[in-house]
Amino acid sequence: MSQARADLWPRGDPRHTKSEAEKKVYDALKTSLPDGWYAWHSLKIRTKTKGEFSEADFVIADPNRPSILVVEVKGGHVEQKDGLWLQNCMPLKAPPLDQAFSFQRRLIECFRENRVKSPTIGLAACFPDTFFSQQPTQDDLRGLVIGGQHLHYLGEILDDIMRCAVPEPRPVKGPWIRSLHEFWGETWVPKLRLGNKIRLDQDHRIQLDNEQLQRLDEIEENDRVLIRGAAGTGKTLLARETAIRQSAKGRKVLLLCFTDALSHWLSKETIHPNVTFASVRQFAAKLLGENTEEQSRVASSEYWNSISLRAAIDGLPAEDELWDSVIVDEGQDFSEEDWELVFECLRKNGRLWIFADEDQAFWKDRRIPESIEGSFFRIRLNKPYRCPPGIQNLSDCYAGRCQIDPQLVSACLQADMIRLIPCPEQRIAKQVGNEINRLLGEGLKPFDIAVISVRGRSAEENICHERELGGQRVVPATDQEADSQIICDTFLRFKGLERPAVIVTDLRLVSDLYETRMHIAVSRATSFLRIVAVGDEIRKDQRLSWVF
């Protein structure tokens, strides 16, 4: 609130109170508060330095003089006998203005703590159930008591009472009206900064639950297992945990995946003896003694398509140096030649576990070998762990497993977990940069954010060719600093990874396999999903057009 309007707060009804007397005063102020004045019912304060609490029944402010009137309300029949104050013939716990005096001192202290020079504060009492013709003669109350007979024309007498309570106002400094309104607290909508929410989400997801522990036991009980699960069901987490368990038992373990960036992440996150993490084709090149960094820059697709078979024939170590346990993640992306290398790496009677999700398969000529389909023990992972329900629902829609659930997606929209940002084609990069800076401003760190293009790197307009977005440095998923920086890469190179905030873009550049690309990209977000696209592309997508 930049500046409170001339008004009575609350605007509709008084704050919760059992006092019928306070309700009467509220109704009187509602119809007769002088123009330009402010009033608050039930203003509670606490000093920061001493932690002292106090409450005023009503605080009335005249911004023009300027001055404040604290009004203490006493219901029932109030009278003074032999110097004692009585309420309905029973002694009052304290004289009428004692609580107001206490509030006055603490209010001045609160102003001081907020670097505001307080206006002069006067005190008054109101007895709405007591009617009289003459004011009490007790000096501190003389001319400062509002009776039941005054309520009908309160607006006419408030100025006189204020001038009696504050005859000589002093100059003020600072936004005292705004401070009063903030002390009172008109509106508080609980909101968790996005950065704080991410940390809470991670705390909930970091531990294996009982179902996952049961799956691990089932995996280890069988030498040949095919584990299928949709995106976000914890396949990579279970594959990694299986590798660690096997290593702890003294076995030599090889965990192969397809995505280079995923193998880099696994290698950094899991430094464990006897475990080798690698992407299958980079691993093949190393077996052949070839420079993988150099080949990544210059080698053709034919080179990489044949590298695994070459390694299976010419690059394997001796039998006694093969692996006791081989674990495959992203099995749906392995080619026939890749599978040949997998089987050749496994020593006789070794153990083989395969994790796969055909809904994330991008190359339609690749599949799990029939020998595995027909003979391996099978496990299905059904419980999603990665995405919030609304994002999970949208991802599942792209995989063809369901329709949009309006309730789930609407909840994510309201919580700002999902946001669509339409913009002109020429402003895509700028808009992505704006969204990055907004997320950083909400407390996210660079390593919480990934920008994912649903187009391959060959497209010149692909956002992945940018080195900065919104003035922030971005790096590919395979960069050595990727774990501390904003990642900007393609959906394929980011497959298998996840980040709290994912910005999906380049929808306009897609000509085929749109649903698969979007399913992979959307399912990478563990907390927040942003889709930045040309408006026409959003409208063409039936799922996004519903959200939009």
Image: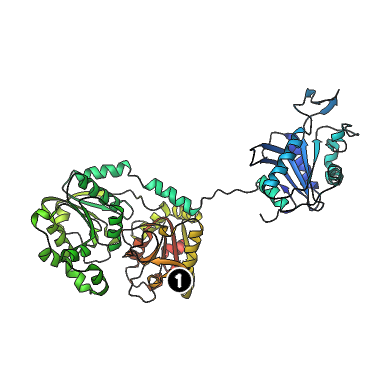
**Label 1: few (<14), some or many (≥20) within 10 Å?**
many
Q: Nearer the viewer, residue 268 or 21?
A: 268
Please say if 466 is above or below 102: below
- Give the residue at x 19% y 64%: 286
The image shows residue 410 at horizontal and vertical percentages of 48, 55
Q: Is residue 548 visible?
A: no
Please say if 4 is above or below 461: above
- Amino acid type of the residue tagged 1 in the rendering: Ala
* Quadrant hosting residue 497: bottom left
The image shows residue 487 at horizontal and vertical percentages of 38, 63
Q: Nearer the viewer, residue 25 or 479?
A: 479
Point out the image quarter for the N terminus.
bottom right
- Residue at the bottom extreme? 460
The image shows residue 118 at horizontal and vertical percentages of 75, 48
In the drawing, does residue 177 fall left or right of residue 192? right
Q: Which residue is mark 1?
A: 429
In the drawing, does residue 347 fall left or right of residue 360? left
Q: Nearer the viewer, residue 130 or 83?
A: 83
Mark 1 residue element: helix
* Quadrant hosting residue 317: bottom left
Count numbered badges in the picture.
Answer: 1
